[in-house]
Amino acid sequence: MAFSVPDLPYAFDALEPHIDAQTMEIHHDKHHGAYVTNANAALEGTQWADSPVEEILKNLGALPAEKQGPVRNNAGGHYNHTLFWESMGPGKGGEPTGALADAISSTFGSFSDFQAQLKAAGMGRFGSGWAWLVHNGSGLAIVSTPNQDNPISDGHTPLLGVDVWEHAYYLKYQNRRPDYIDAWWNTVNWDVVAGRFAAAS
């Protein structure tokens, strides 16, 4: 079954004032749409054409050599953005509770220390990419990936990712990536992230 762009689980303007409606519309409809179109085209006619995107990203090396780059970029973009939309919501933000909160505190020192470290990963990503909270098989870790690369390809389970491509923030924040990341925390749906953590644990 070919990939398709999932509907946003909220309106384009639902994350205002933190992320503006025009950015959300272009980001979802145009950018995510292009990743889906290009991923489907790259996979067409291969044995992977009907595989779940997670399986494809875990097995990039098994694809024909000429397909690996386009699939890494575009199937990765599809997966990353699907997780990104699901990780946000109106009236969210704040801090996690329960087992996820305990794990963040024990791993990073405190929630504010975790925020600082994830922000640093996003700020330190030269050019385009992502900063991630992942489960690495033994516990939590922060990693950064270039372009549309995904931690799944490195054997990690993504729990939360912040998109630091300029298209994610430039209309509202221009070159102020730190301000965008600070505002993005106000959109994080910790219930969804906690569910991923529970499944990965």
Image: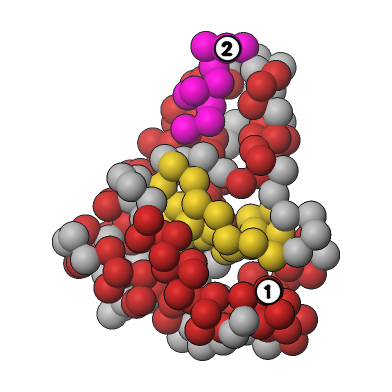
Q: Which of marks 1 and 2 is in front?
A: 1
User: Would you call the spot at circle 2 few (<14 residues within 10 Å), some (14-19), or many (20 or more)?
Assistant: few
| Residue 2 placement (x, y as % from top left) | 60, 31
> Against 84, is 117 above or below?
below
Quadrant of the snapshot with the C terminus: bottom right
Residue at (70%, 28%) from the top-left corner?
59
> Against 153, is 114 above or below?
below
Q: Is mark 1 on a helix, strand or loop?
A: helix
**In the rendered image, which residue does mark 2 sit on?**
65
Quadrant of the snapshot with the N terminus: top right
Q: Is the magenta stretch mostly helix, strand or loop?
A: helix
For marks 1 and 2, give the CA distance: 38 Å
| Residue 123 placement (x, y as % from top left) | 35, 60
Is 71 included in the stretch rendered in magenta? yes
- Comparing 6 with 155, the one in front is 155
Residue 50's label in the rendered image is none
Q: Counting residues from the N terminus, which is met first, the one under dot 1 or under dot 2?
A: 2
Is 72 included in the stretch rendered in magenta? yes
Residue at (30%, 69%) from the top-left corner?
178
Residue at (28%, 80%) from the top-left corner?
17
Q: What element carries label 2?
A: helix
> Against 75, is 165 above or below?
below
Q: In this view, does 82 lie to the left or right of 102?
A: left
Q: In this view, does 26 lie to the left or right of 194?
A: left
Residue 107's label in the rendered image is 1
**First to last magenta residue range:** 64-73
Residue type at the position of mark 1: Thr
Residue type at the position of mark 2: Ala
| Res. 11 in view | no
